[in-house]
Every structure is written in C-alpha cells, then in structure tokens.
Image (cartoon, helix red, strand yellow):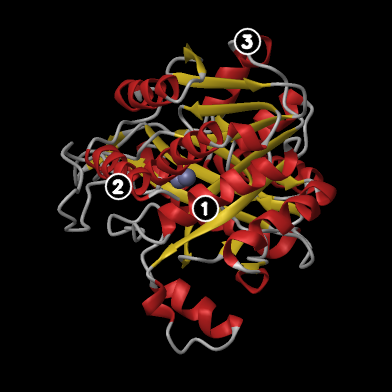
Amino acid sequence: MESDLVERLHGVYRDLHAHPELSFQEQRTAGIAAAWLRECGYDVIEQIGTTGVAGVLRNGDGPTVLLRADMDALPVPEATGLDYASRTDGVMHACGHDMHVTCLLGAAATLAATRGDWSGTVTVVCQPAEETAQGAAAMVADGLFDRIPRPDVVLGQHVAPIPAGVIGLRSGPAFAATDSLRVTLYGSGGHGSRPETTVDPVVMAAATVLRLQGIVSREVSGNDMAVVTVGALTAGTKYNIIPDEAELLLSVRTYDPAVRTKVLAAIERVVRAEAQASGAATQPRIEAVESAPAVVNDVAAVDRTRAALAGVVGAERVIDPGPVTGSEDVGVLADAAGAPLVFWLLGGADPSAFAGAADPAAMARIVAELPSNHSPRYAPVEQPTISVGVAALAAAARHWLGA
Ligand code: ZN
Ligand code: ZN
C-alpha cells in the first residue's frame, strides 16, 4: 500500500475513534465515508435506512462484489487512555467499527487506483446500527438492492482480540444468532413492612433469573450451543417499598434455528410459570427487542476467498477461530441479495502480547486475558491492523472480480 494512503487512513481512524456515534446517529461518520468514496470516483448514495452509505464503482463487464463495514459506536465510557480517545462522554468505538470503516475506505481507494487490473463492479456499504442488529435490515427495507447492483458475493470483516496479522476464517455457522428480550414482571406493590399484602416482583424476578439458568444446562443438548444471559434486572426505588414491576433484559445466542426456537419457547414458559408461582394477577410481558440471524459463511465461497486472504498474511496465519458466540447482522445483507457471505475476523491485538504462545491453547489463554470488544479498554493496535484489513478486503474483492 502506498505510504500516503496509509498516512491518510491513520488520520481517518483516529478521527473516527475520537468522534464515535451511536446506532442510527452516524451522520458525521457517513459524511466522511461518502466524501472519501466520491473522491475515489464512486457513485455514492447516502441516507439509506437513515445514515447508510453505498458506493458503486462500475468498471466494465464482470462480477459484482459487495464490501461491507458497520459504523456505529457503543454507550461505553472510554478508558483506553489513548491520545485519540473519544471526545464524546459516555460513547466509545468499543467494538472497533471505526476500524471497519477505515479499512473499507482503504480498500475502496486501492480498488479504484488499480482499476486497470480488474473488471466488474465494486459496491461498498457502510451500514448503521449493527450494535442494535437493525442497520442492515433498515438499509434493505429502504431499497438498498434496488439502488445498487446485486452482488455475487458479500465480503466483510470484524476486528477481534486475536493477534494483528492473523485472520480468523470459518466455514458454515461463524457468528451466533442473537435475540434481545425485554421481560416485564407485574406484581402488586405496597409497604416493605407488610409483604403479605403484596405480590413482590423483586422475588419473582430473582426466582426467574435463577430458573432461566436451567434452560441451557438442562434443556439444550450438550452438542448444541446456546447462551441465555440476563444482562439487566431493574426493580424498585427505596428500601421499604415493594414495587409494582420488575424488568429483565435478556440476551440469547444460538446457531441452530431449531435450538433458537426451543430456547425462546423455554424462556416464555419459565417466565410465565414463575409469575404464576408468585401469584401474579397480570401475565408478564415478553417483548422481542432486537434480533439477528446467525452468520453462516458459504462453504464454497470461503474456500474461494481463503486463497486471497492467505496471500495477504500467509496460509499459516489464516486460522479457524471456532464458532463465535458474538453476533452480527451482516448476514441480513447477504440473504437479501441472495449472495454467499464470507465474513472473517481481523486480528487487532498487539502481536507482542502473544510472544511465546506456541500453540492455539496458549493463544486462546492470552486472548481471554486481553480487553475484548465492548470493553472500555478495547484498543486495537493501528498497525498492522489497518494495513492487513485494507489488503484483506481488497485482495478478497480482486479474487472475485474479473481479470
Ligand atoms: Zn459490538
Ligand atoms: Zn461489532
């Protein structure tokens, strides 16, 4: 990569990192991406599904490739101590989506600058609101694939705390399906000194949280993957008041649609049964707030792309990271386009942290100790992460485009 492009990308990355924007509020980020793509010669469409940006570079006959990045940040107060840390209180690029945008813009520039070497169409998509699993669906609902050519493949990457210079690529189910549920338990409040006159939603919530733990351990086969986490439990205001309601926020992860259906049904059964056991007069409310299907990488498309990624980092540095329990809505784009998906992990951890890690188990132990995505201390190293991320996207795209 040319050194002035690397220099510019470092500037873009630090600027995006310092100015994180929450889901569906990525106006500034989208503006930067749109301006960059126009300068590279792309036809640019803005405000798709709120802040989404699509760029199209037509370069003769041949296949169409879609490269995707997400743009949103998280409501996390940054604690990295970086000199380019967030300037917005309580908001941080804690999932590395600033890295995704930076690498996508670098790849878009690289492909535009080398257009004499390939033929076909490159489309790039900067999507909003990955963190709420709504952004890809919003762009599709706003007619994304009526406005840009339908791709023959969807390519993308997510930065992760594996060593920078390593790429994690997996065929088949790669990221879990996610379901976020809000459960409202209705009791009947009163004075804390007279619980016999109430139906206590705090006790109901506590019993429900514990009983939910039995779903994965007692109802899901040991051969299947599922996670049920109660991430928030809210009830009450004061020592001596029994409140009327309690609220639980749940995150559910699965790979297999049948397991997903089973787990969601079990959650509903447990919630309703615990309310009944408490003598609640009103049925609890269970709302599905966010949902994204599992990311399933197309086996043939992964095989085809692997050679391109190996050409960037070396075959021994393209590893199988195993299935990830994290989730991603990139699969929504591939499904809507009817195209195969290849989505990989981009190493972002300081390689020196892994010195002496001789085998995968040692590497996994170090990964477990490093700040991970969503941590207030998550800070990918700029290099070689940016250069590898740009080269990986550009090489994978070139591999699918015509000669
Ligand atoms: Zn995230
Ligand atoms: Zn993310």
Answer above or below: position of 381 versus 298.
below
Q: Residue 183 location in percent, x, y?
A: 50, 35
Q: What kind of element bears circle 3? A: helix
Q: What kind of element bears circle 2? A: helix
Q: What kind of element bears circle 1? A: strand
Q: Residue 322 location in percent, x, y?
A: 67, 65
The residue lying at 56 percent from left, 56 percent from top is 345
Q: Which residue is mark 1?
A: 229
Answer above or below: position of 186 versus 94.
above
Q: Which residue is mark 3?
A: 147
The residue lying at 16 percent from left, 38 percent from top is 89
Q: Which residue is mark 2?
A: 7
Q: Earlier in the sequence, mark 3 or mark 1?
A: 3
Q: Residues within 10 Å of mark 3 (few under 14, many from 20)?
A: few
Q: Are marks 2 and 3 in contact (CB under 8 Å)?
A: no
The residue lying at 66 percent from left, 46 percent from top is 396
Q: Earlier in the sequence, mark 2 or mark 3?
A: 2
Q: Choose mark 3 or mark 1, whichever is in front.
A: 3
Q: Amino acid at mark 3?
A: Arg
Q: Residues within 10 Å of mark 2 (few under 14, many from 20)?
A: few
Specify whether 363 is left or right of 61.
Answer: left
Q: Amino acid at mark 1?
A: Thr
Indicate yes or no: mark 3 CB to ligand 2 under 8 Å. Answer: no
